[in-house]
């Protein structure tokens, strides 16, 4: 599903993509494993080394699952992240330097149709909803109904969306409920949910309301950001995710073992605790 919004100004975020990725790497996360990042990624994968490329919405659960798998199986797993559509593009091009990818189910279907992913090795991860984020010291508005969402958005001094399809969807929701003109002067767009949530964490004095995947909001628990709630069913997006093995992998046995582990209760708990349903 695609959502097109035309003529809308984008915010010039404080961090460039390269600076942001470098910051993430310094915090312990790997850089995206794509053809453009070969110099930053580990060497060729072996039976004792795997690379996973996860969309941001499933990153937090994937990190925990990978850590436990590595400890128990003795196979090192490096987990990197990128936009789902970037992972899809690089995988379709055959340049995604990864053994396993975790992306929306619709994107995975394109990979299997193009014979880039093994259709016999697909794991259902679960679904992710859209939630509203506020600073931990701010009141938590009710966004569970369309009428209360409208009130909350109009009351906010700043409204934050990502440049991802979820952000475009919310922009269309504002059009649908007749508040696009009121929202436009206070609307800011961010390249990633991480940048959006960081902005909220760093601006506690601003009455700000942001929207993004619930898993990425919950990933900022204890860091200044809390989830006000999830959107009403009538305007909600419930996006299912799958994990799959790319056919370009040089470690098919290890990838199969990791995917098998991801079906177990301990692995599933990591994803549930991160907000995946």
Image: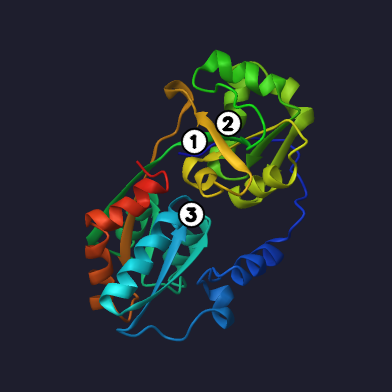
Label ID, residue 84:
3
- The location of residue 213, given as percent across then percent down, is 50, 42
* 2 and 1 marks in contact (CB < 8 Å): yes
- The location of residue 120, given as percent across then percent down, is 20, 61
Q: CA distance from mark 2 to mark 1?
A: 9 Å
Q: Nearer the viewer, residue 190 or 224?
A: 224
* 3 and 1 marks in contact (CB < 8 Å): no
Mark earlier in primary sequence (3, 2): 3
Q: Nearer the viewer, mark 2 or mark 1?
A: 1
Figure check: 34 above or below 65: below
Figure check: 276 above or below 171: below
Q: Residues within 10 Å of mark 1 (few under 14, many from 20)?
A: many
Classify residue 49 by image quadrant: bottom left
Mark earlier in primary sequence (2, 1): 1
Q: CA distance from mark 3 to mark 2?
A: 18 Å
Label ID, residue 130:
1
């Amino acid at each position: 599903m695609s959502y097109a919004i035309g003529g809308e100004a984008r915010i010039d975020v404080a961090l460039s993509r390269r600076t942001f990725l470098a910051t993430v790497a310094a915090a312990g996360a790997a850089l995206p494993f794509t053809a453009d990042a070969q110099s930053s990624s580990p060497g060729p994968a072996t039976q004792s080394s795997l690379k996973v490329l996860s969309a941001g919405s499933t990153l937090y659960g994937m990190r925990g699952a990978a850590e436990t798998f590595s400890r128990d199986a003795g196979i090192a797993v490096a987990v990197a992240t990128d936009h789902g559509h970037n992972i899809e593009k690089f995988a379709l091009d055959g340049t995604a330097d990864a053994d396993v990818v975790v992306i929306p189910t619709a994107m995975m279907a394109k990979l299997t149709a193009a014979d880039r992913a093994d259709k016999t090795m697909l794991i259902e991860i679960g679904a992710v909803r859209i939630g509203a984020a506020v600073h931990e010291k701010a009141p938590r508005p009710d966004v569970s109904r369309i009428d209360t969402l409208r009130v909350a958005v109009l009351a906010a001094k700043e409204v934050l969306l990502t440049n991802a399809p979820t952000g475009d969807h919310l922009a269309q929701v504002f059009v649908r409920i007749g508040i696009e003109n009121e929202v436009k002067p206070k609307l800011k767009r961010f390249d990633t949910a991480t940048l959006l949530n960081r902005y909220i964490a760093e601006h506690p004095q601003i009455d700000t309301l942001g929207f993004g995947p619930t898993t990425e909001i919950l990933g900022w628990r204890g860091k200044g950001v809390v989830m006000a709630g999830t959107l009403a069913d009538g305007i909600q997006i419930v996006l299912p995710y799958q994990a799959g093995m790319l056919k370009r992998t040089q470690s098919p046995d290890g990838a199969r073992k990791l995917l098998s582990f991801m079906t177990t209760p301990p692995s599933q708990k990591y994803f549930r605790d991160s907000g995946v349903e």
